[in-house]
Every structure is written in C-alpha cells, then in structure tokens.
Amino acid sequence: MTAQSRLRWRLPLMAAYGFIGCVHLAAPDAFLPIMPDWVPAPRLVVIATGLCELAGVLGLAWGPTRRWAGIGLALYAVCVFPANLKHALEGIVVPGLPDSWWYHGPRLAFQPVFVWWALYAGGVIDRPFRRRAAEAPAVSPSPKS
C-alpha cells in the first residue's frame, strides 16, 4: 500500500474525529442522555472523549505518533460503542442527530469499520486479505515431475 493511498484514508478520518471532538468539547451536555448509567462522571467522560478525539487527530498527523494514535482511536471506537448502542436502543433524541434506524443501523454496523480504519490510518494493519510485501511468503519454484 502506498503512502499516498494511506494518506487518502487518513485525512477524512482526521476530519471526522476533529469535527466530532470539537462538538464534544463545545456541547458536552448534549451527549449526556446517551451515556450508559454505569459510566461515572458522565460530563467529564464526554469532555475526555473530545480531548481523546483531538489528540488522535494530532497523533495521526505526526509520523512518530501515528501508530499509537491509530491504536488509541481504534480503542476509542470500541469504548464508545455502549453509548451508541444505548442511543439506538432507547431511542434517545439528541438535537442535531437523526432519530431513526436509517441512522442508528449503519452507525452500529460500521463501528468495526471505524476500528479497522483507525488501525489502517495509523499504519498498524494493511488492507484486509492482503499481506505487506515483507510478510509475503517467498515463492519457491515447483519441483519438476
């Protein structure tokens, strides 16, 4: 995979996390209704998620931290899944977000894609079902019969 291709995947991910990170910091109270009841200090957690998203964006932008940022954003996507699930299953209205399964269904279904995308953007993994050249097995000539 070329660096150019990976960059084309990284930039939209950075834009998305940058935007939503700013939203989490600007309006944390809007996200409180979707926080599971077992989460302590929910407002602080929403603010922390915004900071994590922005830190992930900065980390993806800088080569030496890119790998760790990808891992961090992948873990982040796993950690916010309970809030996304509560939002969908309890039909909680969040101003500015659609309140339909046309929104929630794809959002929940694509959560694993966001995990993969963060890992790919961070250079942790390659595209599915393809090995990196250095990991590909050497091709040995077949014996002649």
Image (tube, grey):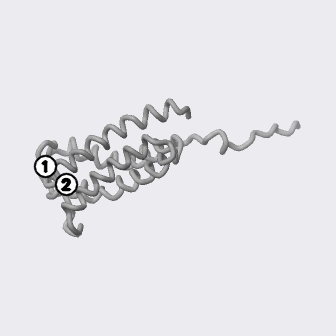
* Quadrant assignment for the N terminus: top right
- Name the residue that disc number 2 marks: 87
Q: Mark number for residue 94? A: 1
User: Is label 2 in a helix, a strand or a loop?
Assistant: helix
* Quadrant assignment for the C terminus: top right
User: For the residues marked 2 and 1, what is the alpha-carbon distance in whole angstroms?
Assistant: 9 Å
Mark nearer the N terminus (2 vs 1): 2
Question: Residue 116 at what x, y percent from top left?
Answer: 44, 46
Q: Which residue is located at x 32 percent, y 47 percent?
A: 54
Q: Amino acid at mark 1?
A: Val
> Disc count in the image?
2
Question: Residue 40 at what x, y percent from top left?
Answer: 23, 69
Q: Mark number for residue 8? A: none
User: Is 144 positioned to the left or the right of 28 in the image?
Assistant: right
Question: Residue 61 at what x, y percent from top left?
Answer: 43, 40
> Which picture quadrant has residue 78?
bottom left
> Which picture quadrant has residue 133?
top right
Q: Which residue is located at x 46 percent, y 42 percent?
A: 62
CB under 8 Å between callouts 2 and 1? yes
Eye-nearest disc, 2 or 1: 1
Q: Residues within 10 Å of mark 1 (few under 14, many from 20)?
A: some
User: Is 130 positioned to the left or the right of 94 in the image?
Assistant: right
Q: Residue 98, relative to residue 34: is it above or below?
A: above
Q: Residues within 10 Å of mark 2 (few under 14, many from 20)?
A: many
Q: Amino acid at mark 2?
A: His
User: Is label 1 in a helix, a strand or a loop?
Assistant: loop
Q: Nearer the viewer, residue 12 or 22?
A: 22
User: Is 82 positioned to the left or the right of 78 in the image?
Assistant: left
Question: Residue 122 at what x, y percent from top left?
Answer: 47, 45
Q: Residue 32, relative to residue 10: is it above or below?
A: below
Q: Nearer the viewer, residue 100 or 83?
A: 83
